[in-house]
């Protein structure tokens, strides 16, 4: 795509954006917004499941973190990222961020379960 002083894509002082470019930007941005919404909903579903895992772990005095499971998941996600043409290092960083949040939730659940058991004398 080429631009001139009378037709640029940033809407700056050089002139107006071509209506076809503006329409294509809007279409792509709508798709991005839909994908972002789907990602948020998928993360919410994932965290509902991990909350259940946290309660199960707490009920059976299992540790909040599972390093072997985490390593397996990271390797798996890196393979998926590669096959999807996504930077595996980025995918790993994202999963590490999610895992850290899950562990934080599991620790909080375990702390709450411990306080509840202590309060009831169990």
Image (tube, rainbow, N blue to C red):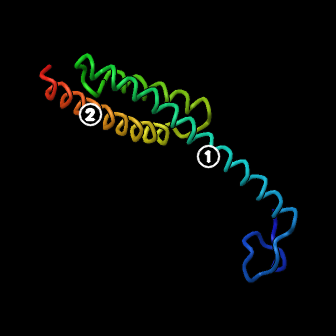
Picture mark count: 2
Left or right position of 116 against 96: left
- Classify 10 Å Cα crowding around label 1: few (below 14), some (14-19), many (20 and above): few
Say which residue label 2 marks: 107
Asked if the residue under mark 2 is in contact with the one under mark 1, i.e. CB atoms within 8 Å, the reply is no
- Classify 10 Å Cα crowding around label 2: few (below 14), some (14-19), many (20 and above): some
Q: Quadrant of the N terminus?
A: bottom right
Residue under the point 31% across and 31% down? 106
* Closer-to-camera residue (96/37): 37
Q: Quadrant of the C terminus?
A: top left
Residue 29: percent from left, percent from top: 71, 54
Q: Point out the residue furthest to the bottom here.
A: 13
Camera-side mark, 1 or 2: 2
Left or right position of 69 against 42: left
Helix, strand or loop for disc 1: helix
Residue under the point 68% across and 49% down? 32
* Closer-to-camera residue (83/63): 63
For residue 83, what is the image quadrant?
Answer: top right
Residue 101: percent from left, percent from top: 37, 39
Residue 116: percent from left, percent from top: 21, 28
Left or right position of 71 against 45: left
Left or right position of 115 against 18: left
* Closer-to-camera residue (76/43): 43
Q: Point out the residue furthest to the top here.
A: 60
Q: Earlier in the sequence, mark 1 or mark 2?
A: 1
Q: Examine the rendered structure and indicate whether residue 112 appears above or below residue 30.
A: above
Calculate the distance from the C-alpha at mark 1 to the C-alpha at mark 2: 28 Å
Residue under the point 33% across and 24% down? 55
Q: Which mark is residue 36?
A: 1
Q: Examine the rendered structure and indicate whether residue 24 appears above or below residue 18.
A: above
Helix, strand or loop for disc 2: helix
Residue 66: percent from left, percent from top: 30, 24
């Amino acid at each position: 795509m080429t631009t001139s002083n009378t037709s640029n894509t940033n809407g700056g002082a050089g002139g107006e954006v071509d209506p076809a470019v503006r329409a294509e930007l809007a279409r792509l941005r709508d798709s991005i917004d839909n994908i972002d919404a789907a990602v948020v909903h998928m993360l919410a579903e994932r965290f509902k499941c991990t909350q259940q895992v946290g309660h199960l772990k707490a009920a059976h005095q299992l540790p909040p973190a599972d390093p072997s499971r985490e390593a397996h998941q990271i390797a798996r996600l890196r393979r998926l990222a590669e096959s999807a043409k996504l930077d595996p290092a980025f995918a790993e960083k994202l999963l590490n961020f999610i895992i850290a949040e899950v562990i934080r939730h599991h620790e909080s659940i375990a702390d709450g379960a411990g306080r509840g058991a202590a309060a009831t004398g169990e």
